Image: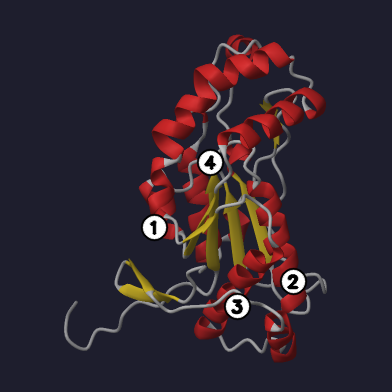
């Protein structure tokens, strides 16, 4: 960088990626984090949640039949439109909300619903404005370079294989009506391989690992407080300090300043390593 040139500022929006295996509890963590951030900011923050599953690629009739029969690999990263997901995140960071169309995927029919209206970020007070926090969950958030580089905070929801399989069986049979035989066939042929070959090895890229899956309010508090620290460092927002202090009362988990990551020309100090 030439002398006298200022380092480009990071966008005010904080991007948090939440990765982990199928049925590890990524959506649960995402929802809990969104709820806690809203509570700590007294409803001021505008929070947007994206799900990688909504960016599943279109299937023609034959491919849909194969997927429903459990013979098409829907656990692979190739099942997702990573380009569209990355572009959507980039547009949100750029504030180009008019260009954002967030898809909605019907997991029962294996097809997309009608395209949504342009994104209008709104907080719980009904106030429109720019996105403050973008929470993106998906199995492969740590496996694609573009997605890794756009994330300020990278979370991995770690749950053992038996529990993930059990949750997947309940979800797919009870919520999605998939026959048990097909659930096991998909897992053994595709899901297990995807986790062991791509998803779990990428865990090393995470800033935070939740070793018990979505359990533990203290871990959600720590992540939420870290996000608020980042927001305060980037903006002049007046968040309720009393709420922040109250959230720390009674916590035994420590915050440390030990890990640093580099994002382009900007060094961000990671202020939490769960210990």
Circle 1 sits in a helix, a strand or a loop, which is it? helix
Q: Residues within 10 Å of mark 3 (few under 14, many from 20)?
A: many
Q: Position of residue 146 (x, y in %)?
A: 39, 51
User: Is residue 26 among what the camera can see?
Assistant: yes
Give the residue pinned by disc 2: 38
- Left or right? Give the position of 244 relative to 271: right
* Quarter of the figure with residue 97: bottom right
Q: Nearer the viewer, mark 4 or mark 1?
A: 4
Which residue shows up at 78% across the image and 79% down it?
A: 42
Residue under label 4, please give it.
139
Report which residue position mark 1 lands on. Answer: 149
Q: CA distance from mark 3 to mark 2?
A: 11 Å
For the residue pair 177 and 255, the one nearer the viewer reads as 255
Q: CA distance from mark 4 to mark 3?
A: 25 Å
Q: Earlier in the sequence, mark 4 or mark 2?
A: 2
State the separation of the CA atoms marked 4 and 2.
25 Å
């Amino acid at each position: 960088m030439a002398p006298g040139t200022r380092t480009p500022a990071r966008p005010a929006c904080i991007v948090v990626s939440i990765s982990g295996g199928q049925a590890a509890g990524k959506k649960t963590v995402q929802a809990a984090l969104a709820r806690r951030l809203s509570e700590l900011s007294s409803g001021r923050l505008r929070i947007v949640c994206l799900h990688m599953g909504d960016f599943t690629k279109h299937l023609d009739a034959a491919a849909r039949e194969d997927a429903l029969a459990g013979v098409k690999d829907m656990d692979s990263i190739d099942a997702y439109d990573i380009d569209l997901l990355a572009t959507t995140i980039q547009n949100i960071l750029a504030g180009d909300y008019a260009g954002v169309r967030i898809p909605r995927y019907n997991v029962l029919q294996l097809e997309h619903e009608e395209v949504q209206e342009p994104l209008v970020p709104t907080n719980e007070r009904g106030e429109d404005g720019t996105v403050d926090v973008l929470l993106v969950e998906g199995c492969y958030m740590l496996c694609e370079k573009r997605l890794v580089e756009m994330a300020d905070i990278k979370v991995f929801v770690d749950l053992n294989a038996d529990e993930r399989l059990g949750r997947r069986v309940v979800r797919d049979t009870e919520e999605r009506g998939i026959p048990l035989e097909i659930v096991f066939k998909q897992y053994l042929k595709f899901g297990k391989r995807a986790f062991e070959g791509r998803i779990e090895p990428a865990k090393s890229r995470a800033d935070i690992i939740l070793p018990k899956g979505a359990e533990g309010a203290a871990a959600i508090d720590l992540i939420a407080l870290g996000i608020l620290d980042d927001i305060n460092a980037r903006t002049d927002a007046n968040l309720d300090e009393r709420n922040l202090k109250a959230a720390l009362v009674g916590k035994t988990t420590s915050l440390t300043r030990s890990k640093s990551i580099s994002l382009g020309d900007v060094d961000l100090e990671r202020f939490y390593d769960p210990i």
